[in-house]
Amino acid sequence: MKFLILNGPNLNLLGLREPEIYGKQNYAALEQFLRDTCEAEGVECVIAQSNHEGVLVDRIQEAYGLFDGIIINPAAYTHTSVAILDALKAVQLPAVEVHLSDISTREAFRSISYAGMACLATCKGHGFESYKEAIQYLKTYLLKKKEN
Ligand code: DQA
């Protein structure tokens, strides 16, 4: 089982940016957490981060045929990007949306998620653990799908 884990804009500044919301650990620590979690779950992963919407769209398109599923934290593009929504719909790979913070209890503009409309589930509000929940959700979904 192979997952693409995509992280959007400003997540490379984890640790520095609003630590009271996103935590004190940096992006390298998140990558290590993702590698360790995937290894423990027996899942292969490729992790990528970009500050550019088009690059994220390219990565989703390129995932077609190469990955079993996508875990995506589109960051600020969550609330604006029809292009990311359309890319997820186009490739039809099972996807799970992740957020470190709980976007449903913050500013009103964060309660809309375009990417989420093409995702099986949203894991949010639990910091790095949100990603673990998403990895486990996607793995369970794919294993169940294989059984049927
Ligand atoms: C975020 C939430 C978004 O609203 C915000 O723009 C981010 C990070 C999160 O992980 O909590 O950049 O996706």
Image: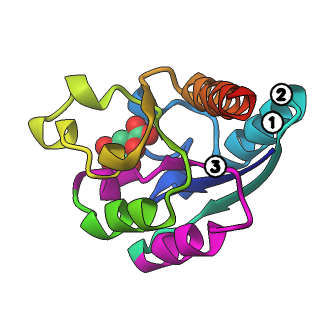
Q: Is residue 56 magenta?
A: yes
Along the line of sight, the residue nearer the viewer: 69 or 53:
69
Residue at the spot of label 2: 41
Residue at the spot of label 3: 69
Q: Amino acid at mark 3?
A: Gly
Write down the quadrant of residue 146 in the picture.
top right
Q: Earlier in the sequence, mark 3 or mark 2?
A: 2
10 Å crowding of disc 1: few (<14), some (14-19), many (20+) = many
Q: CA distance from mark 1 to mark 2?
A: 5 Å
Pointer 1 with pointer 2, Cβ within 8 A: yes
Pointer 1 with pointer 3, Cβ within 8 A: no
At 54% from the left and 73% from the top, the residue drawn is: 61
Write down the quadrant of residue 101 in the picture.
top left
Pointer 3 with pointer 2, Cβ within 8 A: no
Would residue 2 be found to the left or right of residue 63 on screen?
right
Q: Earlier in the sequence, mark 1 or mark 3?
A: 1
The label nearer to you, 1 versus 3, is: 3
Q: Ligand 1, what quadrant?
A: top left
| Image: magenta residue range | 54-79
Q: Amino acid at mark 2?
A: Glu
Residue 132: horizontal and vertical position, in percent? 65, 27
At 32% from the left and 59% from the top, the residue drawn is: 77
Q: Is residue 102 magenta?
A: no
Residue 29: horizontal and vertical position, in percent? 73, 40
The label nearer to you, 3 versus 2, is: 3
Which SS class for mark 1?
Answer: helix
Q: CA distance from mark 1 to mark 3?
A: 13 Å
Which SS class for mark 2?
Answer: helix
Residue 13: horizontal and vertical position, in percent? 53, 53
Q: What label does residue 38 carry, if any?
A: 1
Would residue 66 be found to the left or right of residue 77 on screen?
right
